[in-house]
Amino acid sequence: MTYNRNAKSQSDDVSKEASSNTALLDRKREDADLLGKSAPRRSIFKRPASSVMSWLAVAGVAWGLGLGYNLHLGGEAHWLKRLYQNKVAIAAETTQPKLIVTGGSGAHYTINSDLLSKEIGMPAVNLGLDGPVGLDVILPSVLETVKPGDVVLLIPEYLVLQSKDGFGPKSGLFGVAIGQPGLGGVPPKQLALETFQLGIPSLRWTVKSAVDLAEEGRFTGYYDGPLTERGDPTETKLREGEWWPLKIKEPASGHAIARITQFKSEVEAKGGALIISVPWVYGDVEDARTLENVQKTADAFAEIAPTLVDEATMNVQPTPELFADTHYHLKPEGREVRSQQLARQLKPLLGEP
């Protein structure tokens, strides 16, 4: 009998404990239901409108700061804008008929305008810019400087000539920087992308600018050096790596030839004249394809306007001794040699001084 009473007592205790646990569980469920009704759960992916607006405001300020840096302080756009504006101002100050030398950096870093002016008896202005701006943007940017009696000498690099649409990676950026967005008909998608990227300084440029400020106390850039009174660079950058002869894999594209043909008409409509020069380049003089493509380019030029080229070398140089940091840029002594050659070729077309 004692065993049965203990068993019954234990059974009663278990039943009471189970009832207590059930009641506690029921109360927790009721509390959870009340909490769910009074405070609905919110998705972690949703944010209040005020938070979104705050984020957009911060992003907008950051983009604006990046834009200010790129356009007015130390970005590529700033240096290109300054280079162009300074050269246009020099051209505007030259009131008498002048020789305008233009193209990419292969024009900017390849002539001695003082020497050229003296040899041809006509003021020469260096309006060479930067190849990645693209042929279709460089040409209209220069056209506004042409006045009656001016002669435009176009010296385009092969990379510029080989473009199938006339645009480069800086076409949109350049137009925005000089206050003419879309100059040359830059495609809307490219223009929008490059404009957006103007507000986002790259890591490379950010680090470079920080180093510049720490070491030199100012921002620097590839085109930051002062110009002569005729627009020539006063600084020379030398190559640090090994040289190799450049192969010209394609002649000028059909688009480039058509655009230069149109440019000739535009120059003539302003009372000017166009002359074209095959560029000097350190190239592979043993490569038959290179020489063939240079010849094709020169022949296409000749159908548009008077063309300057050394028939013996096709302007392909066998050694890099006169070249500075690229296959197109020349050292000061190289610019003198090149300018003397141009002067000899120009004199019969311009008339002896």
Image: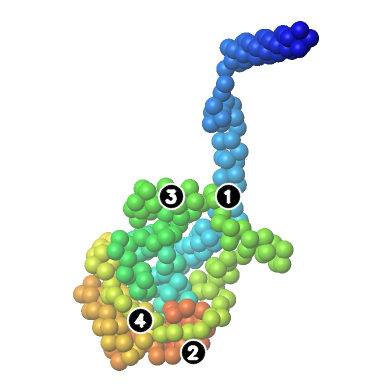
Q: Earlier in the sequence, mark 3 or mark 1?
A: 1
Distance between mark 4 and mark 1 Cα atoms? 38 Å
What x and y, as percent, mark residue 26? 63, 11
Circles 3 and 4: CB atoms closer than 8 Å: no
Q: Disc 4 or disc 1, which is closer to the eye?
A: 4
> According to the image, label 2 marks what residue?
321
Q: Which is nearer the N-term, disc 4 or disc 1?
A: 1
Res 203 → quadrant: bottom right
Res. 97 visible in picture: no
Classify mark 2: helix, strand or loop: loop
Compare residues 101 and 150 and report the one nearer the observer.
101
What is the distance, in whole Å, between disc 1 and disc 2 at their CAs? 40 Å
Q: Residue sitting at 37 percent across and 74 percent down?
A: 157
State the residue position of label 3. 193
Q: Do residues under tags 2 and 3 come within 8 Å of each other at their CB atoms? A: no
Residue 101 appears in view: yes
Q: Residues within 10 Å of mark 3 (few under 14, many from 20)?
A: few
Distance from Cα at disc 2 to Cα at disc 3: 40 Å
Labels 2 and 3: the sequence-earlier one: 3
- Residue 54's mark? none
Residue 278 point in image, percent of width and height: 33, 79
Residue 21 spot, x, y in % from top left:
68, 14
